[in-house]
Amino acid sequence: MKEYKEIQVALLGLGTVGLGVYKVLQMQKEEMQHKIGTEIKIKKILVRNLEKAAGKIEDASVLTNNWQEIVNDDKIQIVIEVMGGMEPARTYIMEAMQAGKQVVTANKDLIAADGKELMDQAKKSGCDLLFEAAVAGAIPIIRPLKQCLAGNHLSEIMGIVNGTTNFILTKMAQDGMEFEEALALATELGYAEADPTADIEGLDAGRKVAIMASIAFNSRVTFDDVYTEGITKITASDIRYAKEIGSVIKLLGVARNTPEGIEVRVHPMLIPERHPLASVNDSFNAVFVHGDAVDDAMFYGRGAGELPTASAVVGDIFDIARNLQYECCGRISCTCYKQLPIKAMDDICSKYFLRMLVENEPGVLAAVTAVFGDRKVSIEQIIQKKKIGELAEIVVITEKVKERHVKDSLKAFEEMTAVKKVSSVIRVYGE
Ligand SMILES: NC(=O)C1=CN([C@@H]2O[C@H](COP(=O)(O)OP(=O)(O)OC[C@H]3O[C@@H](n4cnc5c(N)ncnc54)[C@H](OP(=O)(O)O)[C@@H]3O)[C@@H](O)[C@H]2O)C=CC1
Ligand SMILES: N[C@@H](CC=O)C(=O)O
Ligand code: NA
C-alpha cells in the first residue's frame, strides 16, 4: 500500500458542476482523511477566462488557462473533466490517461459517442476512468450496473434521466407554467446543458440511455443507435388530456435486451398517475432496472444541479483515491464483450395516444377507425372531445401495436380530406 499525505487533482472547468465539486471537497475537508485515508487537494483549475473565474473561489492562484501546466505536472494524479462538449475534452482526457493520470468525467456526450476508445485507452494506461455523474446526476447508477448488479442478466432499464425536461413538464402540469418560462428557470438553476437543445430534444437523455444500455447488456450502444424525440411538441392540451385519463406525461428513456436486438429509445410517454415514475417531479430522476436475479430495482434522486452532480463526481474521486493507495487503478475496465444488433424502431410495440382534428360529419369516426383497422391497429378508446367550428377534436388510444402500423395509418390520414390534422402522437405506457 502507498501512503499519500495528499492526492493532488486538477479540475477542468469551473461552471455549475466544477464549482459544485470545489464546494463539496471543501465541505468534506475535515472528514475525508477518515473516509479515504488521505486529503484531496485541488492543485489547478483550468478555465477559459481567468478574470471571470477569479471571483468564484478563495485562492485564484490555482487558476490556469494552460492545459500543458496540468498534463505535464507529475504531481497531479487525478484529472476531473467538467467542461463538457466533445473537444477539447476528448483530447485532454486521452492525454491525461496517456500521462498516467486517473480521470473522472461528467461528460455523457463524450462517453456515449467515444466510450469504447476512451475505455480502451484507460485499459492500455491501467487507469481509472469513472463517470458516475454522466448518467442521472447524483443517482448512483453506473456503479450499481457495473458492480452491484454484475450477478444478473439485465433485461430492461427504464426511467426519467433528464432533470431539465422533468422540471419543465412538472412546472407545466402543476403550475400551468409556459414551456419557455420553465426552461429559463431550469437554466438558471443550473440543470440545463450549455445548449439546452440537448435537453429538450431528448439528446441528453439519449446519451444516458446509450451509456446504461452498453453497461447493462455488455454490448456497445452509441448515441447514434438511440431513437430520440424530445418534449418540444408537448402542449398544454396534451397535458390536460393526459390528466383527464388519469395519466401524466414524462420523457422516458427505455432500453430493452430482446431476442430481436437491443431496443433503445427516448420519447415522451403517458404513464398512469399510480405508476411510481409519475410522482418523480422537478429535477428528480428515477431509473428502473430489471434483472433475472435482482428482479426489479429502482434508483431515485436528483438528476441535475450543482451539488447533487458534484456528489457523484466526488464519490468517483474518493474511489480513485482509495485505488491509488492500494495501487489497484484500472481494476474495472470495459465490460462490452458482445455485439448485439439494435432493434429497428418500426418493430417496437407500444400503445399510442393520438389527438386529431377531423370534419364533424357523420361517418368520419367510422372512416378513421377503418384506416386503423386496415393497418392492424386495434383501438382501445376513441373519444370525441370538442367541436371547433366545422371540425371535431377526437382522441384515440390504441392497443399495444407495432410502430410501423401506426406510421402507416398516419400516412393514410395525410391523404384523407376528412382528417385535417393529427395534432399529437404520444406513446402510452402499459400492456
Ligand atoms: N449541470 C448539471 O446538472 C450536470 C452537468 N453534467 C455535465 O457536466 C459537464 C459540465 O456541465 P456544467 O457545469 O453544467 O456546464 P457549465 O457550462 O456550467 O460549465 C462548463 C465550464 O467549463 C468551461 N469550459 C468549457 N470549455 C473549456 C475549455 N476549453 N477550457 C477551459 N474551460 C472550459 C466553461 O467556461 P466558460 O464559463 O468560459 O464558458 C464553463 O465554466 C457537462 O459535460 C455536463 O453535461 C452532468 C450531470 C449534471
Ligand atoms: N442537463 C442535464 C444535466 C444532467 O445530466 C439534465 O437536465 O438532466
Ligand atoms: Na449518476
Image (spheres, rainbow, N blue to C red):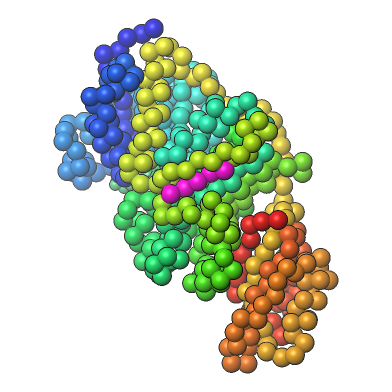
Asked if residue 13 shows in the view, the reply is: no
Q: Which residues are magenta?
A: 284-288
Q: How far across and down, in percent of the image, does residue 248 sit?
A: 53, 62
Residue sitting at 50 percent across and 30 percent down?
143
- Which residue is depicted at the point 67% across and 64% down? 352
Does residue 130 lie above or below 283 as drawn? above
Position of 121 compared to 49: left or right?
right
Residue 120 image point, x, y percent: 55, 26
Residue 197 position in % (x across, y down): 46, 57
Give the left or right position of residue 218, taking residue 173 as reference: right
Is 37 on the left or on the right of 195, as rendered?
left
Task: Check if residue 286 falls in the magenta segment.
Answer: yes
381 shown above or below 283: below
Q: Main secondary structure of the magenta part?
A: strand
Work out which quarter of the rendered image holds the C terminus and state it: bottom right
Evaluate whether residue 31 shows in this view. Answer: yes
Q: Camera-side residue: 155 or 8?
A: 155
Q: Is 350 situated above or below 161?
A: below
Which quadrant of the figure contains the N terminus?
A: top left
**Quick check: is 374 in the magenta stretch?**
no
Looking at the image, which is closer to me, 274 or 401? 274
Q: Quadrant of residue 323?
A: top left
Task: Find the residue positioned furthest to the right.
Answer: 374
Q: Quadrant of residue 115?
A: top right
* Residue sticking out furthest to the front: 274
Residue plotted at (56% across, 56% down): 274
Horizontal side of residue 281 vs 398, given as left or right? left
